[in-house]
Image (tube, grey):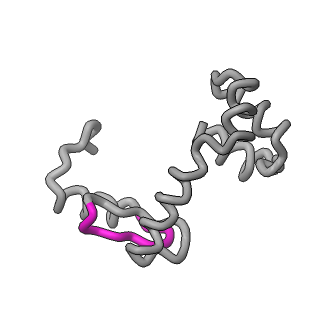
Amino acid sequence: MHEALFKEYFEGARDIGDLDVLMDIARSAGLDPEEFRFETLIGRYASLVDQTTSTARAKGVTSTPTMIFDDRFVLTGAQDIETYRSVLERLGAIPRYPI
C-alpha cells in the first residue's frame, strides 16, 4: 500500500486525501476497498500514526525523508547510495545482492 500511495501521489498526481481515491488505490494494492473504507472512517490506525509521529518528533525528525537505522543513525534528506551503504556496513548488514 505504501508503494501504491507514493506512486499514485507523485507519479499519478492523484489526491490521496480523497477517500474514493484511497479506496481505488487500496483495491489496486490487493486490499478490500470496503474494509479499507471502514477502517479509515473509524480511525482504526489513527493512534498508531500519532504514536509514530510523536516518536519521530522526539528523535528530532523535522523533515522528510528521514531514515533512522537501529535507533543509532539518522539520515535526513536525500542521500546517495554510498551514504546508505556506509551506514548499513557499520551496522553489520550483509548485502542480499552484492555489487
Tell me: 33 left or right of 50.
right
Q: How many numbered badges does the structure rendering display?
A: 0
Q: Is residue 54 above or below residue 43?
A: below
Tell me: 50 left or right of 25.
left
Residue at 48% in and 59% down? 51
Assess whether residue 76 is covered by the magenta stretch: yes
Tell me: 12 left or right of 60.
right
Q: Residue furthest front?
A: 42
Residue at 65% in and 38% down? 4
Q: Is residue 76 above or below residue 9?
A: below
Q: Quarter holding the N terminus? A: top right
Image location (x, y in percent) of residue 69: 30, 60
Residue at 58% in and 44% down? 45
Residue at 70% in and 40% down? 42
Q: Is residue 84 above or below residue 58?
A: above
Image location (x, y in percent) of residue 33: 73, 25
Q: Quarter holding the C terminus? A: top left
Predominant secondary structure, magenta span: loop
Specify the quadrant of the image occupied by residue 81: bottom left
For the record, the magenta segment spans: 71-80
In the image shown, does 26 or 45 lie closer to the viewer? Answer: 45
Assess whether residue 44 is covered by the magenta stretch: no
In the image shown, does 95 or 8 lie closer to the viewer? Answer: 8
Image location (x, y in percent) of residue 24: 79, 31
Image location (x, y in percent) of residue 67: 41, 62
In the image shown, does 27 or 14 lie closer to the viewer? Answer: 27
